[in-house]
Amino acid sequence: MRSQNAASPRHRRDSERLRSEGSQPERPVQPIDAPEICEIGAPINGEPQYSTRRLFLQLQVFTGCSRPHELIEPLKASDLEAVLYHDLNDPKGVGLLFMTEDADSLVTETRRILTGEPFNALHPRPEFTMVGRTYASGREPDLEDWLLVKPRRNTLNPELSWAIWYPLRRQPEFYRLPKPEQGKILMEHAMIGRTYVEAGYAHDIRLACFGLDARDNDFVIGLMGATLHPLSHLVGEMRKSQQTAQYLESLGPFFVGKVCWQSPCDIG
């Protein structure tokens, strides 16, 4: 089993090089008046962190699978990191989560896998397809960890065997609120989740899916835990926040899965 608290070998080499040089990656040159599309983290020594790297995650769900373990070998042979889930709500259902920095892989390598045996005998459930990208809010103390390491640390951790994935879309009115008001609403929501994380009950992944989701959702949320009940409890508590109760237009569908297989994790 690979270690679970460090980045991949390439990520570790990048991080170690940057630490040894005592600097952050240089901000890419932006054309005059161009929108800022880099991910930005909290300042270090007064200088913001910038990154053009991010992870793309895609969940595909299938039914008609009576022998899930036969799906593992093609996943092992792939260069993509993946998680195979048993579907709680479908005795012949499975979920397949792919992770990659290269968005092209989600229409090349994943297509090669899913159109080959034994996946080509399964029946897709596109209503559960979710896709998103990691993003930063500007407050992350370790931008690389947030964008590239944390999602892998949570999804590939063999101790976190349960997962709940769901998309959400906010009402347009939320985006017209003043930024301080938005921040207050989001902080209330985030503090609920933080108490569960700090207690060891749950671990979360937040992905942006603006323009990527077929149903026009804004975000995809993943919750991982060693047992299922705390994840369900957290979703219930989140319903009480102002964001959920007042400013969500849609929530779900929910995919609930237990890990059948995970890619080996090289995060220590």
Image (cartoon, rainbow, N blue to C red):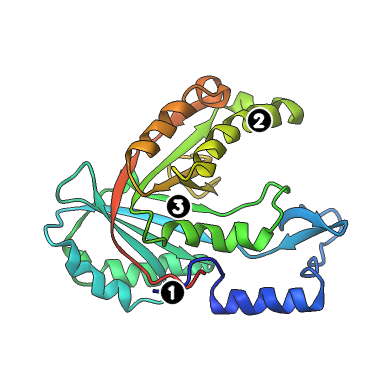
Closer to the N terminus: mark 3 or mark 2? 3
The amino acid type of the residue labelled 2 equals Tyr
**Mark-to-mark CA distance, 3 and 2:** 22 Å
**Residue 163 at x, y = what percent?**
36, 48
> Along the line of sight, which residue is nearer the eye, 39 or 30?
39
Tags 3 and 2 in contact by the CB under 8 Å rule?
A: no
Write down the quadrant of residue 118 in the picture: bottom left
The amino acid type of the residue labelled 1 equals Arg
Residue 253: in sight, yes or no? no
> Along the line of sight, which residue is nearer the eye, 212 or 11?
11
The amino acid type of the residue labelled 3 equals Val
Helix, strand or loop at label 2? It is helix
> Along the line of sight, which residue is nearer the eye, 35 or 182?
182
Instruction: Return the mark for residue 131.
Output: 3
Helix, strand or loop at label 1? It is loop
Crowdedness of circle 3 by 10 Å Cα count: few (<14), some, many (20+)? many
Reading the image, the residue beneath label 1 is 2
Write down the quadrant of residue 265 in the picture: bottom left
Instruction: Return the mark for residue 175.
Output: 2
Q: Residue visible at 83% across and 62% down?
A: 31
